[in-house]
Every structure is written in C-alpha cells, then in structure tokens.
Image (tube, coloured by chain):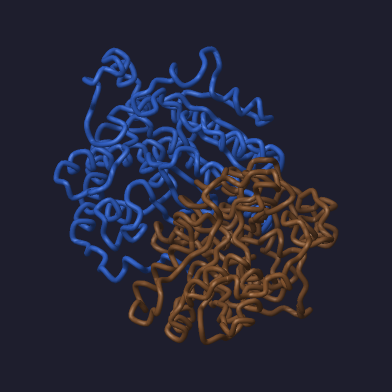
C-alpha cells in the first residue's frame, strides 16, 4: 500500500478494532477511509465493484473473514474476474486479490469451516494461493498484489497463530512455485495449507521407524508447480497428498491424477490421498474431531505403504493433552 | 434543440437500425455463429444517452448491446468481424456478440449474465473517482436486471459513496417470453426501486430520443458535479425475438395488437417525421444518408467475411495476463 497508491483494501470489518485477526490493524489510520474501505454486507455486489475498479486501474485487495462469505460472489469471481482478460482478447486485466479465511475449531460448524480451494483451482483465469509460513504469507501476498490476474489468497485460521522470521523489507515469494519443506528419500508427502504442519509432525514420527519423508508445501495451487512435485515422486516412488478440503472431488485428487499420469512407472505402491471426511463439519467437538486428517493418519497411511504396523511406533511419546478443537492452548475462542 | 444535434441523433439511430437489419438478413447464412440479441426498436435510448457522453466516459452493456456499442463510438468493422468470429473482431473472436468491447471509445465491455455488469459499472465509477478522474460511467440494462439482488447491492453502494454513475434501465416489458406481470408486482414502477435506495430516479419515453437526451443530460450533468448517481427508466419495446433474427409474435406470448402499437411508435420514424416537418431534413438528404450508411454496413460485412479466423495457437493465449 505504501508503494502503490492504486492498492486499496475492501472488506467487512477491515478497519474494525480486531483488524481481521490482526492483519489490517492500523491501516485505516495510516491510509484513510478511502483506501481502507469497510463495505456494506453485499459480497456479490462489492466483488463486482472491486472488479470494476480494477478495470478502471485500481488494485483492490478484498477480504472475507470466512471463505463461505465469498460464495455469495461466485458469479462475479468465476464469470467475470476470471474471464475478462480472455474474453475481450487480452485488452483488460483484473489485478484483484481476494483473501479468504478457512475456519476451523471452536465449533465453527458447517458454514464457517469449509476449505473450498479446489473449486477456485478448477477455474482457468484464476490463480490460487495457500501460504503456510509467516515468511511465505508476506512474500506471497506481495506477489499476489503485484500480479495482474485475479488471485484467490486463502489463509488458514489456524496458521494465523504461528510464528516465524519475517523480514521488515519488501520481498516477494513467486507464485507458481512449491516449497521443499524437508528432503527425504522414502515417501513424498504433498500438503496444502495447514496440512503442511501435520505433515511435518508426521515426518518426525516416521523418522522413528527409519522412514524419511520428503515434504512439499504446494503454496500455489494454480498454477501448480508440477516439476517439483513430479521430481520428488520420481525420487521416492511413494506418494501421499494431504489436503484441507473434502476428499471426494478435492484438490488431492488433482495432484494424485497428475502423479499417475506422469510418473506411474516410478511408483512402488499405489498413491494415496487424505482429506476431510465427506460430511459437513458438525459443531460439536465430540464429532468434529473425527473430520480432520491429522499427523497420525498420515503416519498410518505411510506405514501401510511400507507394510509396517502402526503398533511398532511408540506413539505414546507423541500423545498430547490439548483439545483437538483449538490450534493451541492460547486459543480460547470464539472466532 | 439544435438542428445539427437532432440530425446527428437521427443518423446514429438509423445507423444502428441498418446494422441490425443487415445482421438479421445475413444471419441465416450461418456465418455469424454466436447468439445475437438485436436492439431494433430500442435505438433511441442508446443514442440519446450516449449523445451526452464523451469517449472518456465509460459504458458497460449486456447481451443486447450492439446499439450501445455503436452509439458510444465503437468501431463497426470490428463489431461485425467479432460476430463472424474473426481475429480482427473487437474481442479477437473470443467474445462474440454478447461480449463487445472498444476501449478507445470507452465501451468497456458487455456480458449476458443479467445484472452482472451493474456492480462492475459502479466499481468503474469508484475507480475513476479514486484516480481523480472526471469521467462518468453509464450502465445499460433491461428491467429484468432490477430483479437481481446484485442490482440493489450496487445501487445502495453507489448512493452511499455518491458515485458518478448513471443507471439506464431499458424497460421493454419482456424477459425472453416472460412479461413483467409475472416478475414484478403491479402498481410499482421500476424507477421507484432505485428511488427507494436513495437514488434520484426518473422515468421517460424510451422511444423519444429527445426526451432521452434531455433526461440523460440532466443525469450526466449531476454526475459530473459529484451530485451522485441517477437512475433512468425508459419504456420501450423489442421488435424481434429475444435471441435471433426473426419476428416471433406467432408464438403468442405477446399480442399482435401490442406489437403493432409499438411498431407505430418507432423512435426513428418519430424523429424523421419531426425533422421533415421542421425542414431540418429533406427527403433527398435522407436518401443520401441511407445510401451512405448502407455502403458503410456493406463494407463492414465485407471486412468481416474477408478477415481471417484466429489460429489454433491463440486458444491458450490471454488466459492469464502477464
């Protein structure tokens, strides 16, 4: 926003005291109410407004506190933002970023906890980004704002609490490039968003039985970094994808299909995918705890590939006593 | 009103009419392979509004925007080539009749999803304002669009921010085959909806180009003075079928009597009669005008037919902007 006066923010509550989980705090004081714009509860109309302002030369960054709110504007995102560049022969572009937040835990329930990135990743003309680390969140957001295409920037609520080194200066993490989180020779775990953290936990557990997992953080779902993913599977011969969306019709299936299409001859065992249980997420923690794939499920899946029984692992030393409906003990609700 | 302005508006309406009739004539050749939604009978609204705009002002349209495109100054050859799917088309063949564009004329774009260009037009007005520009934006749409929720969201926001936008509603009474009576309650005029949102609203005879010009002129003036948005409802009638080149009154969704009454109310004929009466236009001058226009239209068709199609390699171009 400091660099380019065309960049402006729009969203329900962007100037409010909570600052969209702290991400917009202080911005309205610094840049004023025109560039940091609260909006009427009109997601569909305001997305059209953002698109129109982009046509006129602005660079809007829109925020939805939950990805579900963006569903009201699917028509504008899919029919308009994604297509204006192509259907008018490349004469206009829509440099729009829409931040969407995936909820989880504390009884968010069926309509505050969906991860619908697969839908957006299906649409030619959109770019879809899911940052994991704080370093990547900043670098990818800057790249997304500078990109001349509509970018769907999906943040996971449980990643807002994580810490990491973030340089003060402006830097960019390129779109379309995955990140090798951890090298390993035995199995490739490709993960999206919060599942990268579960993958890292699972790798620690697997190392105990001598399985070295290579972890790939997808970062950009569209355009997907096929090269890095395929190279990894060529090396390890084993593959599992861990996704934050539902399994059926999910993004994991897309990556798995890619593996089968392109490196089938290098596979030592059938590729696997993990996702949410195929049901709306119930509110009661008694049930929601069964919806989400966790490190232990990744471990179990990988062990099956090596025909190792899970009992061999001394899992008691990994047991934790925090409830499963919060990201960490500091989170006391409600949103 | 000045004679030259009247002559010009007459010329512009006649031009649109001749273009649309030529499209209707050639469509059965099956070389324009996209849906066409002709605006025959509704020309006065496009012309009367756009006569108040400069090429710096912005217009967004719909599936029925051949007239808006031409009245705003969009290039005829490029439009014709677009209908023929040629690479010389205004959208390089990617858009067709329902997605016209001419940036040099300020006709930003058109889409056939009813209501969808309305919030975008509001956004264009917002963007122009944020950039400190003094442009005015016009959104053309039919009366069906005011039934879309997004229309109300757009008008609310435009009123909130006092944006320099004019909403022009062409009420032609039918949404494909559905009459107004099955879509909106009786006793409530369309323009009252915008008024309810706090937008100054007017209703006018859409087939009287002078009335259109006058009301639009007031709206444009207000918008330029940062006085806020205006909603204009113009009553008019579509002569031919919703989509395609033919007449379809035989289908029975509207009566022949109703059609004939509106046919007698032709906006071009009405102005011609007045121009003849006031001696502003002579029979001879009218004939010459028609000849010139017919030649221009023939040229545009020839250009379109002779232009090449886009090559296969262009399929994957422009999916993303660099």
Relative image position of residue B248 (x, y in whole percent): 24, 25
Residue B177, picture quadrant: top left
Chain A shown in which color?
brown
Chain B shown in which color?
blue
Q: Which residue is drawn at 43% across and 68% down?
A: A256
The reply to whether residue B104 is in sight is: no
* Extreme residue in the left direction: B29
Q: Which of A255 and A3 is in front in this view?
A: A255
Q: Which of B299 and A289 is in front in this view?
A: A289
Relative image position of residue A110 (x, y in whole percent): 62, 44
Q: In this view, does A250 lie to the left or right of B38?
A: right
Give the vertical position of B89 relative to A188 (above or below).
Answer: above
Residue B239, picture quadrant: top left
Q: Which residue is drawn at 48% across and 38% down?
A: B140
Give the total of numbered labels: 0
Residue A265, picture quadrant: bottom left
The reply to whether residue A67 is in sight is: yes
Give the vertical position of B205 relative to B6 (above or below).
Answer: above
* Extreme residue in the front direction: A311
Q: Nearer the viewer, residue B322 or B6?
A: B322
Relative image position of residue B199 (x, y in whole percent): 66, 31
Relative image position of residue A230 (x, y in whole percent): 44, 80
Q: Residue at x 41, y 42 (%)?
A: B112
């Amino acid at each position: 926003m400091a660099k380019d006066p065309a960049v402006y923010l729009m969203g329900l509550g962007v100037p409010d005291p909570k600052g969209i989980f702290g991400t917009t705090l202080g911005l309205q004081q610094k840049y004023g109410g025109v560039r940091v714009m609260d909006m009427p509860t009109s997601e569909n109309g305001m997305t059209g407004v953002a698109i129109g302002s982009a046509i006129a030369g602005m660079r809007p960054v829109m925020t939805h506190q939950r990805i579900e709110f963006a569903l009201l504007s699917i028509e504008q995102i899919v029919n308009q933002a994604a297509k204006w560049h192509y259907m008018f022969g490349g004469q206009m572009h829509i440099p729009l970023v829409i931040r969407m937040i995936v909820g989880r835990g504390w009884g968010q329930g069926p309509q505050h906890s969906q991860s619908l990135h697969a839908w957006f990743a299906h649409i030619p003309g959109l770019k879809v980004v899911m940052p994991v680390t704080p370093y990547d969140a900043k670098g990818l957001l800057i790249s997304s704002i500078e990109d001349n295409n509509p970018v769907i920037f999906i943040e996971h609520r449980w990643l807002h609490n994580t810490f990491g080194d973030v340089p003060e200066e402006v830097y960019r993490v390129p779109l379309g490039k995955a990140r090798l989180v951890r090298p390993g020779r035995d199995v490739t775990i490709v993960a999206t968003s919060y599942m990268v953290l579960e993958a890292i936990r699972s790798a620690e557990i697997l190392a105990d039985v001598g399985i070295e997992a290579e972890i790939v953080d997808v970062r950009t779902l569209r355009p997907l970094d096929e090269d890095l993913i395929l190279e990894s599977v060529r090396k390890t011969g084993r593959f599992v994808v861990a996704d934050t969306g539902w399994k059926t019709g999910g993004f994991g299936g897309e990556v798995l299909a890619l593996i089968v299409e392109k490196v089938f001859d290098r596979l030592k065992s059938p590729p696997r995918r993990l996702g949410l249980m195929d049901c709306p997420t119930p509110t009661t923690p008694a049930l929601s705890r069964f919806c989400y794939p966790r490190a232990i499920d990744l471990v179990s899946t990988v062990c099956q590939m090596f025909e190792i029984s899970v009992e061999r692992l001394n899992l008691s030393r990994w047991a934790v006593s925090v409830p499963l409906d919060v990201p960490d003990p500091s989170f006391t609700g409600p949103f | 009103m000045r004679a030259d302005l009247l002559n010009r508006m007459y010329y512009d309406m006649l031009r649109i009419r001749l273009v649309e009739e030529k499209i209707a004539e050639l469509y059965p050749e099956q070389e324009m392979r996209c849906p066409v939604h002709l605006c025959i009978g509704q020309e006065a609204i496009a012309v009367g509004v756009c006569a108040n705009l400069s090429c710096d002002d912005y217009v967004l349209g719909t599936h029925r925007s051949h007239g808006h495109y031409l009245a705003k100054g969009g290039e005829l050859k490029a439009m014709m080539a677009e209908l023929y799917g040629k690479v010389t088309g205004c959208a390089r063949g990617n858009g067709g009749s329902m997605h016209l564009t001419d940036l040099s004329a300020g006709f930003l774009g058109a889409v056939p999803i009813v209501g969808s260009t309305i919030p975008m037009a509001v956004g264009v007005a917002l963007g122009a304002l944020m950039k400190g520009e003094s442009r005015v934006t016009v959104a053309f749409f039919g009366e069906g669009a005011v039934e879309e929720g997004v229309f109300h969201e757009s008008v609310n926001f435009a009123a909130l921010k006092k944006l320099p936008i004019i909403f022009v509603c062409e009420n032609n009474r039918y949404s494909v085959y559905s009459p107004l009576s099955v879509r909106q309650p009786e006793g409530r005029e369309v323009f009252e909806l915008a008024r309810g949102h706090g937008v100054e609203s007017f209703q006018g005879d859409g087939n009287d180009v002078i009335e259109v010009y006058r009301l639009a002129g007031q709206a444009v003036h207000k918008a330029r003075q940062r006085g806020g948005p205006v909603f204009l409802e113009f009553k008019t009638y579509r002569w031919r079928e919703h989509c395609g080149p033919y007449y379809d009154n035989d289908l029975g969704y509207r009566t022949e009597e109703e059609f004939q009454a509106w046919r007698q109310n032709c906006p071009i004929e009405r102005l011609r009669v007045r121009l003849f009466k006031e001696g502003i236009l002579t029979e001879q001058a009218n004939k010459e005008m028609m000849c010139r226009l017919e030649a221009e239209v023939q040229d545009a068709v020839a250009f379109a037919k002779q232009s090449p199609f886009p090559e296969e390699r262009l399929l994957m171009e422009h999916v993303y902007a660099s």
